[in-house]
Image: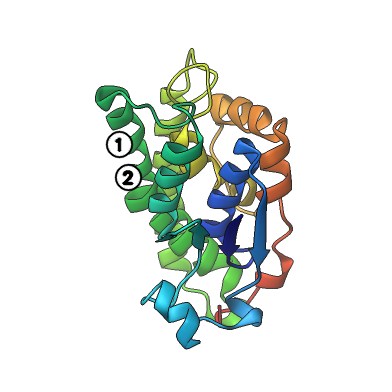
Amino acid sequence: MLKVWGRRSSFNVQKVMWLIGELGLAHEHVDAGGRFGGLDDPAFLAMNPHGRVPVIQDERATVWESHAILRYLAARHGDGRFWSSDPAARARVDGWMDWSQTSLQPDFLGGVFWGFYRTPEDRRDWRAISAALTRCAAHFARLDRQLMGRSYLLGETLSLADITAGTSLYRYFELEIERPPLPEVARWYRALQAREAFRTHVMIPFDELRGRLDY
């Protein structure tokens, strides 16, 4: 059986769990990281030498890093549904996945979510937070344009592009921050909320993370 290590409030774990839910895969979840600890254990480091979650084991395969796990699961179990076997179609998905990881996620998760929500109020760097919010507004505006005339980022079906970018939406819309009008992103978010796997694995209250810098 597929086995997954990570805490459910972890952003990167949520991406993986969302896809597992979409695929309907039977799995065992092992709480690890944060208040659960275990990342420095020799057995865990033998699976991931970086000591980070998520990590999965699937039969004899051990995979770490969230996007590597997404690609593995889609290729192994998705039958082309979320990550095409066609190189050109797959490259379009990969482009949005890489953009999500190198542009959107650092600015939103690192700059806004960590800088604003996870940092105690008396230690917040408001100049840095404001700059990150401005960059995020540009990122989400780009998504808004991409979604025009499409149900999902690359057409009428969900792909790994939606999973990597869409995991941000619950936190983005729940935070008490200024957001520009984003009609297409809001419509996309409603479509994702209608999916059971998104509700179960992404729409998880994150109160435990408020003002916490320790994990």
Q: Position of residue 93 (x, y in %)?
A: 36, 32
Looking at the rendered structure, the secondary structure element under dot 1 is: helix
* Separation of marks 2 and 1 at Cα, in angstroms: 5 Å
Q: Which part of the image, by quadrant, shows the N terminus?
A: bottom right
Q: Residues within 10 Å of mark 2 (few under 14, many from 20)?
A: some
Q: Residue at (46%, 18%) from the top-left corner?
A: 155
Closer-to-camera residue (150/181): 150
Looking at the rendered structure, the secondary structure element under dot 2 is: helix
Q: Residue furthest top?
A: 149
Q: Which of the 4 image quarters holds residue 3? A: bottom right
- At label 2, the amino acid type is Asp
Compared to 151, does 36 lie above or below?
A: below
- At label 1, the amino acid type is Gly
Q: Is residue 162 visible?
A: yes
Q: Residue furthest front?
A: 60
Q: Residue at (66%, 62%) from the top-left corner?
A: 29
* Label 2 with label 1: CB-CB less than 8 Å: yes
The residue pinned by badge 1 equals 95
Q: Residue at (39%, 32%) from the top-left corner?
A: 142
Q: Which part of the image, by quadrant, shows the C terminus?
A: bottom right
Q: Which of the 4 image quarters holds residue 28? A: bottom right
